[in-house]
Image (tube, rainbow, N blue to C red):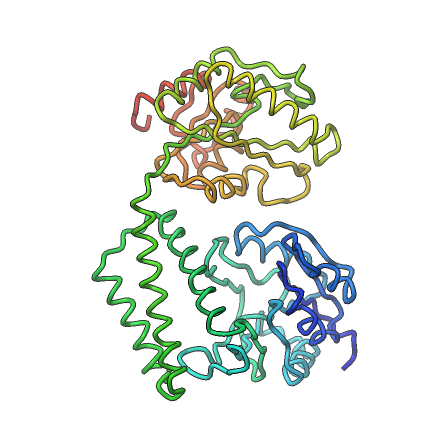
Amino acid sequence: MNHQVPLSVVIITKNEEKNLPDCLESIQWAKEIILVDGFSSDRTVAIAERYTDKIHLRKMDIEGKHRNFAYSLATQEWILSLDADERVSFELAQEIKEVVKKNDPNFAGYAVPVKTFIGNRWVKAAGYYPARKLRIHRKGKFRYEETSVHPRAFLDGKEQPLKNDILHYGFRDFTHFFDKLNNQTTLEAEKWIQDNRKIGISKLISKAVDRFLRNYIGKKGFKDGFMGFLMSMAHGLYQLMTYAKYLELKKQKLRKVIFIDRDGVINEDLIGDYIKTWNDFRFIPGSIEALKKLNGEGYDIIIISNQAGIGDGIYSESALNDITNKMLHELKQNSVNVRGVYYCLHGKDVGCECRKPKTGLFQWAAKEIKFNPSETYFIGDKATDIKAGKQFGLKTLFVLTGHGLIDQAKLTPELRPEKILPSIKEAADYVLGGKSNG
């Protein structure tokens, strides 16, 4: 097949040296191959370099966001989304070539049958085949919900089913299958906690039984013998395992957490410039006392800050580390313990997922500390702080130090914080006073 089929193939990888060669061999006919790697520690990147020079390193944070970022890199009108443990069959490659050549304006995407294997055994029934998935789409017409587990797909336009298969070698054996099931149910339980879902035992049992029957009877799992029965049971077991882990997480004590922006809230902000050295750093009067008071009432303090000066080459990461270490030392000398400091180091124009008002820094913190977002405050001095906090589901307080007086005019009705206060001192008092919205 001609090597110049005008299609971008996008692949997400992390330590896939065993799977990747066969995957890449099956798509050599595509004009563009893009690989987004999550900092693999094996030979994944070295293998990919034999097939493409379009390799991007990005830490996997939220699956939906990660995939949307990867799609944004494509230069061709049509995009094929592929995982490293998948292969494009020869018949599907021919079919894709015809689809791209036709370029039918009536369709924005194509759903492809996925043929899943456990070892060398094809799982034929119980909803595993044809199990069409929307894998081919026009650039700009498709996106994933930006969530960690089973993100929903959104297509702007009509889709058409294709006939031929993607071959999915997702499981080495049954041990590998159940390992993945265990991992997925852990992530799903964490999502239930973050979404503050209320799930009762009767609803859960009903759902588990429904999943089994739907796949064993409705999707004819019984036609594939023991394999069909086992796969149908796995659908129900997914619900039961998730619920057990959900109950376990609920019993864990959630931390009392408060997120605080750094420059302009804790320390004076050099409006129009950056804090480049420790000599530039000055605590805002009353900020240390406010942090100490919050600590004293059992709050874990987490500092969240954009530091675009590093990505834009204005100061170094070592300089930032020096400032951070000295800040933390000064706070500790005053009996203030900071649970975590999370920085976005990207430049202003990079378009990353961690720079506020994006929520990547909060998501990072949430993976390491268990807390209830709806009961957690974020204190900031910029409109982007308020937007970021609201997008993550936090309660927000706006202070008039730093950029506060300038950005107050940017607080549209959609960005209305719970309270506008003179400084972090009053914000801490407000949090500890347990006041209602006002």
Task: Please say if 242 is above or below 121.
Answer: above
The C terminus lies in which quarter of the figure? top left
Residue at far front of view: 175
401 vs 230, nearest the viewer: 230
Residue 156 in picture, x, y percent from top left: 53, 64
82 vs 163, nearest the viewer: 82
Q: Is residue 281 left or right of residue 116?
A: right
Residue 244 in picture, x, y percent from top left: 31, 57
Residue at far left of view: 202
Which quarter of the picture shows residue 395?
Answer: top left
Q: Is residue 386 left or right of residue 252?
A: right
The N terminus lies in which quarter of the figure? bottom right
Which quarter of the picture shows residue 27?
Answer: bottom right
Q: Is residue 316 left or right of residue 290?
A: right
Residue 171 in picture, x, y percent from top left: 52, 72
Q: Is residue 113 visible?
A: no
336 vs 352, nearest the viewer: 336
Q: Is residue 378 visible?
A: yes
Residue at far top of view: 285
Q: Residue at x 50, y 53 (%)?
A: 146
Report the label total: 0
Q: Residue at x 59, y 14 (%)?
A: 282
Q: Residue at x 64, y 85 (%)?
A: 91
Which quarter of the picture shows residue 432?
Answer: top left
Task: Please say if 160 is above or below 152.
Answer: below
Task: Please say if 216 is above or below 157.
Answer: below
Task: Please say if 323 is above or below 343.
Answer: above
Residue 186 in picture, x, y percent from top left: 41, 56
